[in-house]
Image (cartoon, helix red, strand yellow):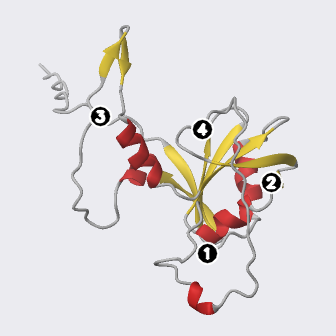
Amino acid sequence: MEEAAPHPKPPDKPAAPPTAAIHVASSTTSRAWNKYFSSLFTSPTPSNQPFFIIKPTTFMGEPFIKFSRADILEFSSKSPYALVGKFSRSKPPMNKVRSSLATFDFKGHYQVGLLDYKHIIIEFGLEEDYVRLFSKSIWVVAGSPMRIFKWSYDFDPRVEQPVVPIWIALPLLPYVFFNKKKPYFPLPT
């Protein structure tokens, strides 16, 4: 009599759900790669900041997570160089948007994400790349015009953002006034 093969033992832990990927590009290597979404929230060096977990609750029978205003401001302060691109007509496919942005020769890394059917978010690692893209109000991306807006934590795609870049030239300003740590003429950013 043949012995039946034993049933496989159920795993102790359920398998981890698949991880979402976000596109990250680096012009220094002139190639693009996928980076796991969860790794965006981990620090490359050990951090002394406490890690906290927000427990979901329910609202009207649906899962619900509530963030305090302080949490939102803290999260948004970690993305100081983020811009929103708005396609007024139709947004090209994301792979064409990414390949078109790769031709812009950004000096640092950047991340591209989808906000909705008309808006993308671009987060830069270097202020220089951020200023370069923000300095021109309309760019042609994958053959479609894309308007640029400053991202903020309260961004609403239904409302046009009133924030625009303004550059002020002070051609004869003495060098001693160019102190980045303690400016003599603080300007709002």
103 relative position to 154: left or right: right
For the residues marked 4 and 2, what is the alpha-carbon distance in whole angstroms?
17 Å
Mark 3 vs mark 2: give the one in front: 2
- In the rendered view of the protein, which quadrant contains the C terminus? bottom right
Provide the residue designation for mark 3: 15
x, y percentage for residue 119?
69, 39
Q: Which tag, 4 or 2, sits closer to the chain's start?
A: 2
Q: Which residue is mark 1?
A: 28
Placement of 89 over or under 188, stated as above or below = above
**Front tag of 3 and 4:** 4
Q: Residue at x 36, y 41 (%)?
A: 71
N-terminal label among 3 and 4: 3
Q: Nearer the viewer, residue 129 or 77?
A: 77
Q: Identity of the amino acid at label 3?
A: Ala
Write down the residue under mark 2. Answer: 137
The first of marks 3 and 2 along the sequence is 3
> Which picture quadrant has residue 107?
bottom right
155 to 46, vertically: above or below: above
Tell me which residue sits at (36%, 42%) in the image.
70
Q: Position of residue 76 (x, y in %)?
A: 47, 48
Task: Find the distance from the CA under tag 3 to the CA under tag 2.
Answer: 46 Å
Q: Secondary structure at mark 1?
A: loop
Callout 1 environment at 10 Å: few (<14), some (14 to 19), or many (20+)?
Answer: few
At label 4, which amino acid type do we have?
Phe
- Identify which residue, 102 or 123, lies in the foreground: 123
Residue at 16% in and 32% down: 12
**Disc 3 versus disc 4: distance between alpha carbons?**
36 Å
Tags 1 and 3 touching, CB below 8 Å: no
Callout 4 crowding tier (Cα within 10 Å): few <14, some 14–19, many ≥20: few
Q: Residues within 10 Å of mark 3 (few under 14, many from 20)?
A: few
